[in-house]
Amino acid sequence: MNIYGQKLSREEIRKLTSHPQQTIGCELFESLDGDMLGQRILRIRNGEIEIEVLVDRGFDIGRVLYRGISTQWVSPAGFRHPHSFTPSAIEPDGWGWLRSWQGGFLSTIGIHHVGGPITHPNRHLHPAITAERRFTGGFISLSPTTIEKIDVDWQKELITVQASVRQAAAFAEHLVMTRTLTMKIGEAEFHLKDSVRNDGYIEEPVQVLYHINLGWPFLAPGTKLKTSCTEMLGCIDSAKGKDPSVMPNPTPKDVEQVWDWNAPSGKQYAELTNENTAGRGKMSMRLEWDGNELPHFMQWRNACEALYVQGLEPATTGLNGRAADNSHAGPAPDIQPGKSREFNLDFKFSGEV
C-alpha cells in the first residue's frame, strides 16, 4: 500500500511501528469547552488524508487535511454544537440557521427542503395543523446521529464509518438518513454514500444540496475551477458577467455569486486546482457525482475580505426551487413509504505538496 508517500507492505509497516494508531486510525472524542461543548468528533486518518466528522451535526465533515494542508472554510460562527443555539426560536423565518452554521468542509442542506424558508400546505392528518414551515438549511445538519459502525480493516486496507439520523415529528415527515464514509488506507480519496428512507405513511419530497466549502490555504487568488457541467441554468444578478472559473483576489464588501449548472446524466466532476498551495506546490481536489442522482451543480463564491470561500454544491434542486426545476431531470421526485433514495459523492485529492 501507499502510505505517507511510500509504497510499503503491511509487514513492513508492522516492523516500523509499535501500534496501528501511529499511522492510521479512527478516534472518537468530545469537546469540553466553548461553543463546541458536548460536540462529538470522529477523527479518521488513513496515511494521506485526515477527516474530522461532526457526529452531532448530521455526520457532516468539519475538516479535511491533505498532507497537513487544510482545505475547508469555516464561517464566522465557527464550529459549534447545534444545541448551543436554537435559530428557529429567535428568528422564526429560518435565517437564524446561519448563526449556527459553521461552514466546514461539508454541510448537508435538506433533506426535506432546499432553499429559503417557505410555508407549504400541510398534507398530514391533523385538522389543526394547516401548514408546514420549511426552513433555510433544513434540519439534518443540526441533528445528532447514532454511530452504527467504526471499522479499520487492515486485510482489506479499508476504513468504514457509518451513522444514521432521523428527521421526524408527529403529523410531519418521517425520514431516516444513513451516511457511510469509506476510504482505502494510504489513498488520498474517500467515498460518501447517503441513503434516505421514508419511514412515514405518505409520500415525501427528498431534496438535498451538498454544501462543500473550500477555503485558504488551499483556496487562494488564481485557484482554478474545471467542471464537466457546461450548461448554465441561471445565476443571481451579482454573478452576471463574472468569470466563474478563476478565484479572484479578496475584495472589500464583495457580494456573493451563485451559478446554477445542469449536471447531465452519468458521472460529473468539479475540480479545484491551486498551482502553488501554501508555497508548497500544486494541489487539486476533485469532486465526482452522478447527474442522475444530483442533476444540479450549484457554484457559490464569495471573494469578500474575511468571507473568502468557494462552494461546490451538487444538488437535487437549483435556483428556481423544486416546483420550477429546469434541469434535465425535472423536479426531485417524492419517495413512497418504505422506499429509499441514494446519493453518492467521491472526493479525490492530489498534488506534490
Image: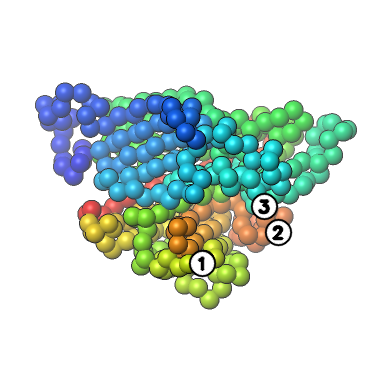
- Which mark identifies residue 116? 3
Residue 252 rendering spot, x and y as whole percentages? 48, 67
Mark 3 belongs to which amino acid? Gly
Instruction: Answer with mark 3 or mark 2, whichever residue precedes in sequence.
Output: 3
Residue 334 rendering spot, x and y as whole percentages? 68, 43
State if disc 2 and disc 3 touch (CB < 8 Å): no
Residue 233 rendering spot, x and y as whole percentages? 59, 66
Residue 9 shows in this picture: yes
Instruction: Answer with mark 1 or mark 3, whichever residue precedes in sequence.
Output: 3
Instruction: Answer with mark 2 or mark 1, whichever residue precedes in sequence.
Output: 1
Q: Which residue is mark 1?
A: 254
**Closer to viewer: mark 1 or mark 3:** 1
- Cα gap from disc 3 to disc 2, whole angstroms: 14 Å
**Residue at point 51%, 59% (across, down):** 300
Mark 1 belongs to which amino acid? Asp
Q: Which quadrant of the figure has residue 318?
A: bottom right
Q: Which residue is mark 2?
A: 324
Residue 154 appears left or right of 75? left
Residue 179 rendering spot, x and y as whole percentages? 49, 34
State if disc 3 and disc 1 touch (CB < 8 Å): no
Residue 257 shows in this picture: no
**Residue at point 42%, 68% (across, down):** 248
**Closer to viewer: mark 2 or mark 1:** 1
- Cα gap from disc 2 to disc 1, whole angstroms: 29 Å
**Residue at point 39%, 37% (across, down):** 52
Picture layout, residue 237 above or below residue 220 = below
Q: Label 2, secondary structure: give it.
A: loop
**Residue at point 43%, 50% (across, down):** 73
Q: Label 3, secondary structure: give it.
A: loop
Would you call the spot at circle 1 few (<14 residues within 10 Å), some (14-19), or many (20 or more)?
some
Picture layout, residue 126 above or below residue 131 = above
